[in-house]
Amino acid sequence: MQDLYHQQYLSTFAEAGINRCRCGLEHRMLTRRVLFGRGAIDQLPALVRERLGARARLWVLSDGNTEQAAGAAVKRVLGEFPLADCLLPASPRPRTTYPLAERLAEELRQSRADLILAVGGGTVSDLGKKVSTDTGIPNWCVATAASVDAYGSGTSNMKLKGFDRTVPVTPSEVVVCDLEVLGAAPVWLFLSGLGDLLAKFLGYLDWKLAAWVTGEYFCPVAAEYSLQSARRALQAARSLQQDREEAVRTLVDALLTSSFAMQAIKGSRPAATAEHTVGHLWELSGRIRDPRYDLHGICVGAASRLVLAAYLELYKALPRLEVDIPARLEALRREPPWQETLEPSALYLKEKMLAETPPGYPDPAEVRGHLEAFARQRQPLQALAAQLLAELQPSLQALAEAGFPFSLKEYGLDEDAAFLPFPYIRYLRRRYSGFNLMHELGLEGEILRRLKASLAALWGA
């Protein structure tokens, strides 16, 4: 198999899974093998014997949908091994919740298995990794859709009380990507994968912004691989109608690359920023009527369109903006605490915001440092933003032509529900983004007003 980008990235890690990166840190990769191509599932028995021996006990986790896609085939080819399984329902769709993970961990312990095989998409993959962490039993993943970049990451996105929490977990030691299985998945799952990767343009910009303005650690290697994975995903979008198999191959390769970049730095920074905050809240709102759109990547892709609109306003304003640092610090000092201005419809987010927002935020000394650093890095920041946002705009058009649902009214969300997360993005994730910058510069109010005013036009487009 030629030109596999994820293999190029994995090759930068030594046999022991260590990469002494030019960013100055040592990265580790627990994933040591990817089975990629047609018939990849058939290679599982030999690999299990090689890694765990002929008497290995296996525990297969799937749901009603992924069982049909690949779970039954996985159990069939592994019939020589002692095998227990857990079949989650197809409907309602399973969620990555702590109670479910705890129940699965107990079932796994009772099975006395040596290996977890999670057969599914992002939810089943995340559950398998979380159960692996809780029990100490290694996990492998069999991907069933090119829908999300979770398969090789070292995090799971846990859902609770209407919001999400990203937690560190044990990555899958082996990832199986059978292109026959992945190619047979419904097209909206393919579009979900495109939407998840579309966010990497915004993620790269915000990570670099945070590095320049706040001094946050930045790995140029992981960031570049993640960004390039998004560019390759757009190649997949453009070839979908002409060559579906090649489009699936390209997209899966890109998703794996993005997931390994996250595993390398032990976090989702290369892959996610404000659009993921919004997308997660839409996904968990319970208001999306069409199950085809109630997917992580679909919500993230649609949210990316609105974040792009806000960032175009932000970076358009910067060239003519004069920043009076003492005046900005005084204006921020006069702002009431966010707890006093929280809208009733957003009260359910208060627990999440308290957990993510440092005491005393925004700290005047930190803000002064941010504004001074912004003044020094203003020109390169504007140049980077101009490049990436100009690249993202036609990418949205490419996804629309591939059938991506950007008309949010189809989702069942009303305009107020869609806009709800935007004023609170900087409180909902302890991660510096363009929304933090626009607040510190005094631009947030006007940009959010324009975004809300334009929402109706964006709604049906």
Image: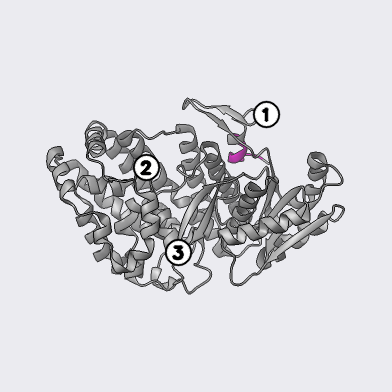
Which mark, residue 307? none
Residue type for callout 2: Leu
| Corner quadrant of residue 360 | top left
Q: In the image, is residue 182 part of the stretch drawn in magenta?
A: no
Instruction: Name the residue type under label 1.
Output: Glu
Label 3 vs label 2, nearer the camera: 3
Where does label 2 land, which residue? Answer: 205
User: What's the mark number on residue 162?
Assistant: 3
Residue at the spot of label 1: 15
Q: What secondary structure is found at the residue carrying circle 2? A: helix
The answer for how far apart the CA atoms under marks 1 and 2 are is 32 Å
Residue 3 magenta-drawn? yes
Q: At which x and y percent is residue 238?
A: 50, 54
Q: Is residue 303 left or right of residue 168?
A: left
Query: Nearer the observer, disc 3 or disc 1?
Result: 3
- Image quarter (top left, top right, bottom left or bottom right) of the C terminus: bottom left
